[in-house]
Image: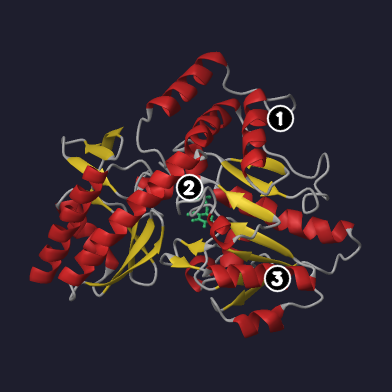
Amino acid sequence: MISSVLPTYTRAPLSFVKGEGTWLIEADGRRFLDLGAGIAVNALGHAHPALTRALTDQAGALWHTSNLYQIPQQQALADKLVEHTFADTVFFTNSGTEACELAVKMARKYFHDKGQPERVEIITFDGSFHGRSSAGIAAAGSEKMTKGFGPLLPGFVHLAFGDHEALNAAITDTTCAVLVEPVQGEGGIRPLPDACLKGLRDLCDEKGILMILDEVQCGVGRTGKLFAHEWAGVTPDIMMVAKGIGGGFPLGAVLATEEAASGMTAGTHGSTYGGNPLGCAVGCAVMDIVADPDFLAEVNRKAGLLRQKLEGLVASHPDVLEEVRGSGLMLGLKCKVAPADLVAAGYGVEVITVPAADNVVRLLPPLNITDEEIAEAVSRLDRAAGALAAS
Ligand SMILES: Cc1ncc(COP(=O)(O)O)c(C=O)c1O
């Protein structure tokens, strides 16, 4: 008999009932070190006092009015995002998937309104992940996500990750945009080298097409810059954001230049909940902390510390681990065993990690993890890897 919850997930036998910073407390009282952060969502850990205060204060005042009216918290968050990024304008969603939907619509509408309605194709890359909606799965294009769900939304061209020649050849008179994650998350923590992102920007400019970045997983301080593309010194035309921006409250956004957003006039897009007072109050609290250069400097320092310790871990377990890769606090352990086995061994020693494709286990801790927690986490991972080597 089907379970009352639609069985689309394979879930670990763990039920967490409370979170405190980098710690998750299981129903039986065990304390787990959380290096997953709800898949890069709890950017400031669990129950951060500033976020709890922002949410509960707003909950006591006003939950929802709709986008028929001015929403001061939404305006404040948009202003913060515009102040700290390339963007001139922001649309708020409830998730990364919805951000993908708008990014696709915005790019197509841009060329439609420019008198080039034939420019509808968006180039994407192997191993990418952009969400589970019809546009999201068509954009990523993998068989695993699309099989059985046809007909797929047309207009996506899939290329191998990092094949510059193929990319050059694939841009035609019907291309409107390139969509890429600066660091692939689900694909196995695969960073796009800065030189490639710069080259991509130049190519988009040369061909007159838009660059859409999906920073749903790698954005909001995760790589040690507020947004990952900043490392390459380039800016996109459109950017998808979600996960960390809400610190655990469902919140996403599409950021865009005035030019790229020019087709999105009144009535062209909307959302009942997107940009609601609760989510935006929390988003403002997240931005106030994460956009601070001192906070980002600490993320970079801790990322260096964690990476150094993980290099040692890989050296100590050559039969289990192959390499560390990634950027900032978005790190991957490439495994020689099934990643699910290392994740499960981690549960045995009370440390949470997240599997990804390409035989990688992801480490996406809260950005405010402490030095002591980093040391403890690596010690637990050492025990987990040791248990696998012994088995
Ligand atoms: C890069 C990327 N884009 C889009 C999404 C979809 O976001 P959401 O699950 O919030 O809809 C995800 C989710 O993992 C993601 O990692």
Q: Are marks 3 and 2 in contact (CB under 8 Å)?
A: no
Which numbered mark, 1 or 2, is in the foreground of this view?
2
User: Which residue lies at the image location 52% right of the left edge and 41% below the top edge?
Assistant: 245
Cα–Cα gap, marks 3 and 2:
25 Å
Residue for badge 3:
202
Mark 2 belongs to which amino acid? Gly
From the top left corner, tell me how far across and down residue 355 is, in percent.
Answer: 33, 61
Mark 1: is the Cβ under 8 angstroms from ligand 1?
A: no
Is there a contact, CB below 8 Å, between mark 1 and mark 3? no
Say what secondary structure mark 2 lies in: loop
Q: Residue at x 56, y 67 (%)?
A: 140
Task: Identify the secondary structure beneath mark 1.
Answer: loop
Q: Earlier along the polypeptide chain: callout 3 or callout 2?
A: 3
Residue 11 point in image, percent of width and height: 31, 52
Kind of residue sitting beneath label 1: Asn
In primary-sequence order, the first of circles 1 and 3 is 1
Decide: few, some or many residues near mark 1? Use Cα within 10 Å; few <14, some 14-19, many ≥20: some
Q: Amino acid at mark 3?
A: Asp
Task: Determine which residue is flagged by label 1.
Answer: 67
Image coloring type:
secondary structure
CA gap between label 1 and label 2 equals 28 Å
Residue where numbered disc 2 is placed: 221
Q: Would residue 230 be found to the left or right of residue 44 on screen?
A: right
